[in-house]
Image: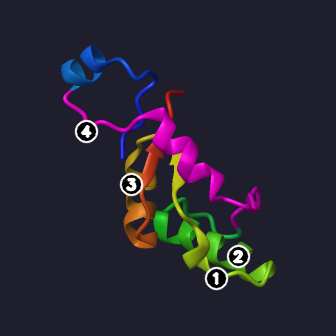
Amino acid sequence: MPLLEDDDLLSRFMSSWKPVSSKMVKQDMERCRDRLLSLSPLDQGSQASEVHTDMFKSVAALYNKDISIVAFLVADNCSTNQRIVTLLEVPLVTCAI
């Protein structure tokens, strides 16, 4: 789900992305009640997406939460993050870094 930096129709047309307005994202964000952030170091030496997914599940379990509460992932569009959202079956909201 690409997020556009503005709601300009010409920008959307030129980029050929599906229209997602900031108003809709704000409405969806209002449903989010808890922010569960994870900054735990990975125990394994691997940076594979499966290791990250396991870490997300471990952090959720630490707070007695299920991974199904994750509504979306905000990250850059690298292949690891694309695989993580595929494994978690959630949308990726990309950010410009």
For badge 1, the amino acid type reads Asp
Question: Who comes first in sequence, dot 4 or dot 2?
Answer: 4
Image quarter of the C terminus: top right
Magenta span dominant secondary structure: loop
Q: Which residue is mark 1?
A: 66
Question: What percent of the width, then of the height, locates residue 43?
Answer: 71, 69
Q: Which residue is mark 3?
A: 82
Q: Which residue is mark 4?
A: 18
How crowded pointer 3 is (Cα within 10 Å; few <14, some 14-19, many 20+) is rated as some
Question: What percent of the width, then of the height, locates residue 41?
Answer: 74, 60
Question: Who comes first in sequence, dot 2 or dot 1?
Answer: 2
For badge 3, the amino acid type reads Gln
Question: Which mark is in front, 4 or 2?
Answer: 4
> Answer yes or no: do the residues labelled 3 and 2 have beta carbons within 8 Å?
no
Secondary structure, mark 3, is helix
Q: Which region shows up in magenta?
A: 16-42
> Answer yes or no: do the residues labelled 1 and 4 have beta carbons within 8 Å?
no
Residue 60 shows which numbered tag? 2
In space, the residues marked 2 and 1 are separated at their CA atoms by 6 Å
Tell me: residue 26, above or below residue 90: above
In space, the residues marked 3 and 2 are separated at their CA atoms by 20 Å
Q: Quadrant of residue 70?
A: bottom right
